[in-house]
Image (cartoon, rainbow, N blue to C red):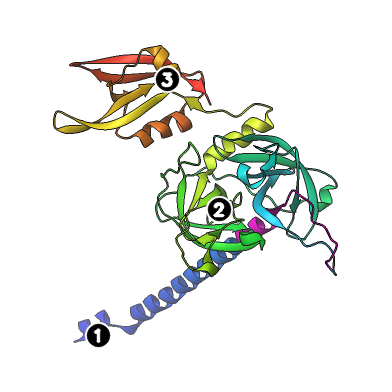
């Protein structure tokens, strides 16, 4: 009985309880610190976000309290006065053509109107880069940095922008498919499950640390009621790493460009299985000797199973004028074909 009493002495149980209390306190402090860091990241992103003002000045006549503000898109400050936005958020019609203006005006979070001059733009990716002008004290007091990590399925993200010309407004959600496509751009897009509207275009898509992982590009309208038109939870963003390539290029005084192969692929059935065949060869691939009906097997020894995979490889892992080696099946034999890539 003495032995049993010693085994079940209340002291060890007391120590376990106290340790458990300290562990709970530590976790609570950790959660509180993470919440404060997240709130700080959100606030910094909000301060870095600008509204792209309508290019044509409104007439103040008839407005009792002055000229109303009209915002057509969003942008985000990357530091040192550099603003990145969507090309279509700044385009204007001149002489029947859409052009990217040399100068735009943006509205900061503290309601300063600041002029910005164009550094460069890329129609391939729908990105435009501007530099703020004037007194630096009127510039956004915050900036954001590109994330070095890719987002993937289910990651938490948020965006800041001017939906329907109002804001800055925040929306929170998750990444859906990080590898999807629309006909509006040539690159892959990140599908995002969060509320976005007209006017969000060009705003930043950010991760939990407040780092830029994408640039809002488009929405697909899913609501049908008149009151909800213009907004959707089915949105798309350009991947941050591709946007960064454009920004880095224009800041270096270069024309941003992406690789062109010139192969048009078609899926067809051959010998009881589906394969990717060349439907048409143009430009670099035509000069390299590709033929209609060639079955694409690999590029640089990476097996290719879809047109999207090939497109991603070319855009994200190659440079214009780089030589790549594609392996194709022609008839009963496989052969390797070297291609010097063109530039978009």
Horizontal arrangement in the rendering, residue 240 relative to residue 268 (left or right): right
Identity of the residue drawn at 42% across and 34% down: 312
Q: Mark 3 points at which residue?
A: 282
Identity of the residue drawn at 57% across and 50% down: 211
Pick the front one: 19 or 116: 116
Extent of the magenta region: 40-63
Distance Cα–Cα, label 1 vs label 2? 59 Å
Pick the front one: 29 or 102: 102
Q: Mark 2 points at which residue?
A: 206
Distance Cα–Cα, label 1 vs label 3? 88 Å
Q: Which of marks 3 and 2 is nearer the N terminus?
A: 2
The image position of residue 96, as x and y in percent, is 66, 38
Label 2 crowd bin: few (<14), some (14–19), many (20+), radius 10 Å: many
- Circles 1 and 3: CB atoms closer than 8 Å: no
- Circles 3 and 2: CB atoms closer than 8 Å: no
Label 1 crowd bin: few (<14), some (14–19), many (20+), radius 10 Å: few
Where disc 2 sits, the SS reads strand
Where disc 1 sits, the SS reads helix
Q: Is residue 167 visible?
A: no
Horizontal arrangement in the rendering, residue 172 relative to residue 307 (left or right): right
Identity of the residue drawn at 62% across and 61% down: 164
Where disc 3 sits, the SS reads loop
- Mark 3 or mark 2, whichever is nearer to me: 3
Q: Can residue 235 be seen in this view?
A: yes
Label 3 crowd bin: few (<14), some (14–19), many (20+), radius 10 Å: some
* Placement of 299 over or under 162, stated as above or below: above
Specify the quadrant of the image occupied by residue 282. top left
Residue 5 image label: 1
The image position of residue 78, as x and y in percent, is 67, 45
The image position of residue 203, as x and y in percent, is 61, 52
Distance Cα–Cα, label 3 vs label 2? 38 Å
Horizontal arrangement in the rendering, residue 295 relative to residue 33 (left or right): left
């Amino acid at each position: 009985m003495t032995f049993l009493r010693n085994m079940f002495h209340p002291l060890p149980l007391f120590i376990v309880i106290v340790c458990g209390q300290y562990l709970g306190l530590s976790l609570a402090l950790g959660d509180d610190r993470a919440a404060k860091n997240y709130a700080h990241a959100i606030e910094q992103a909000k301060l870095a976000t600008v509204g792209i003002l309508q290019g044509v000045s409104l007439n103040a006549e008839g407005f009792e309290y002055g000229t109303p503000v009209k915002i057509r898109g969003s942008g985000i400050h990357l530091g040192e006065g550099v603003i990145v936005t969507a090309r279509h958020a700044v385009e204007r019609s001149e002489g029947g053509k859409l052009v990217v203006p040399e100068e735009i005006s943006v509205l900061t979070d503290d309601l300063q109107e600041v002029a910005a001059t164009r550094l460069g733009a890329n129609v391939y990716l729908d990105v435009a880069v501007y530099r703020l002008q004037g007194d630096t004290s009127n510039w956004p007091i915050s900036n954001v940095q590109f994330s070095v990590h890719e987002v993937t399925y289910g990651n938490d993200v948020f965006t800041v922008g001017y939906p329907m010309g109002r804001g800055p407004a925040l929306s929170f959600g998750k990444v859906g498919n990080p590898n999807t496509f629309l006909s509006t751009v040539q690159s892959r897009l990140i599908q995002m499950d969060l509320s976005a509207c007209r006017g969000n275009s060009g705003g930043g898509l950010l991760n939990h640390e407040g780092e830029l992982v994408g640039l809002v590009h488009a929405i697909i309208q899913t609501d049908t009621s008149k009151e909800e038109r213009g907004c959707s939870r089915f949105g798309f963003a350009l991947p941050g790493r591709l946007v960064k390539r454009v920004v880095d290029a224009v800041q270096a005084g270069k024309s941003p460009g992406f690789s062109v192969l010139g192969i048009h692929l078609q899926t067809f059935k051959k010998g009881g299985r589906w394969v990717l065949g060349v439907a048409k060869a143009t430009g670099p691939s035509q000069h390299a000797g590709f033929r209609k009906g060639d079955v694409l097997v690999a590029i640089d020894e990476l097996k290719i199973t879809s047109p999207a995979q090939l497109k991603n490889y070319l855009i994200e892992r190659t440079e214009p004028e780089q030589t790549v080696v594609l392996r194709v099946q022609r008839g009963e034999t496989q052969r390797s074909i070297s291609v010097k890539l063109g530039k978009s």
